[in-house]
Every structure is written in C-alpha cells, then in structure tokens.
Amino acid sequence: MVPGKIKLLELADHPYFLSELKKLLIEYGHYMYNDLRLVDGKENFFEDLKYLPTVQYQPPSGTFVLALHDDSVAGCVGIKKFKENSCEMKRMYIRPGNRRMGIGKLLCEFVIKWCGDSPYKKILLDTNAEMKEAILLYRKCGFIERRPYCLNENNHPVFMEYTL
C-alpha cells in the first residue's frame, strides 16, 4: 500500500467527480458482465447509472466514496439505506491497475466508520462467488456470510453482513 498517495472523497462534498464516478461504474459493469460473465441484473445496473446520484446514495442516509490514487480515480463504494437499522454497501470497485494497494480495505474501513456514526446497526452486502478477491477482503474486514436478504438473480450469490 502507498498510503500517502491515496485520498478518499465523498461525492456529496465533491460533486464535480460525478462524471468520473459514472465512468468507473461503467467499467465495473463491463467487468461483471463481460469479464466475469454474470448474466442477470445487467439492464438494471446500467439503467441505474443514468440517475446517479440518487437520493438513496446521498447524506444523511447514504453516500458514495471515491478513492483517488495520485489524483486519479482508482475505486469507489456506495452506502445506501436498506431498512431503518441497516444499510447496504454497494458498487465496491477498484480499477485493476490500482488493486493490491490497500484501497479496498480503506474503502471498507471508511464504510464501517461512516455507518458507525449513523443510526445503522448492520451493514449488508450481496456479491457473487465469482468475485473471490472481494469476498476475501470483506471477510478480512469483519463481514460474515448470512442468509439472503435481497434478490440477487445470478447463479452464485453470496450475502454478507457486518454488525456495528
């Protein structure tokens, strides 16, 4: 990790990064649906990008965080309210050239701290077994597997939670 060169910014405080966030999430979509060959949810994923940032990803109930490495957008993660006492961590993505630098861990730690300062008691996430590195990261950050809490139409869904 190169900590001196990584900055985390909330989109709400830096709205001029919205176009960069959208580009990053388009890359994430291509990664999921082309590289990993996930099949379900593609249309919804790309349709949702047209409306970012929706109110659910804005304070006080949510946020989007960008990770910058040498002032270039390297990754992101979103937080959105799920139920009164729980939220979801969504759209965690690190560009391939920025992986193994500790950015994913920094983003997870940010989410946990941000949610710790909120009324949320649990952080939920759903992912897919094909995203092995992400699942390892989530486990290292204290997330545990749980029963399904939402619809994930792909063949190998994994559901996790972190209790605050």
Image: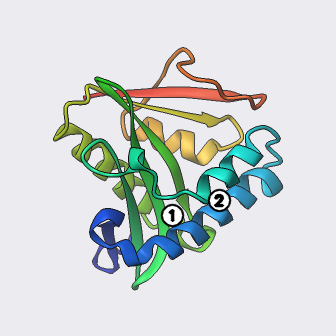
| Quarter of the image that includes the C terminus | top left
* Image point (69%, 54%), residue name: 46
Q: Position of residue 40 (x, y in %)?
A: 78, 37
Classify mark 2: residues with Cα within 10 Å, few (<14), some (14-19) or many (20+): many
* Image point (49%, 65%), residue name: 75
Q: Circles 2 and 1: CB distance less than 8 Å?
A: no
Mark sitting earlier along the chain (2/1): 2
Q: How many marks?
A: 2
> Which labelled disc corresponds to residue 75?
none
Q: Position of residue 24 (x, y in %)?
A: 58, 68
* Image point (49%, 27%), residue name: 160
Q: Position of residue 53 (x, y in %)?
A: 46, 57
Q: Nearer the viewer, residue 5 or 38?
A: 38
Q: Quadrant of residue 79?
A: top left
Q: How is the image coloured?
A: rainbow
Residue 156 as seen in the image, left or right of residue 23: right
Q: Quadrant of residue 163?
A: top left
Q: Quadrant of residue 84?
A: top left
The amino acid type, in three-letter code, at marker 1 is Arg
Mark toward the viewer: 2 or 1:
2
Q: Is residue 119 above or below residue 79?
A: above
Mark 2 → mark 1, Cα distance in angstroms: 17 Å
Q: Is residue 148 above or below residue 78?
A: above
Classify mark 1: residues with Cα within 10 Å, few (<14), some (14-19) or many (20+): few
- Looking at the image, which residue sits at the far top? 147
Residue 42 as seen in the image, left or right of residue 110: right
Give the labeled residue for mark 1. 100
> Which labelled disc corresponds to residue 28?
2
Element class at badge 1: loop
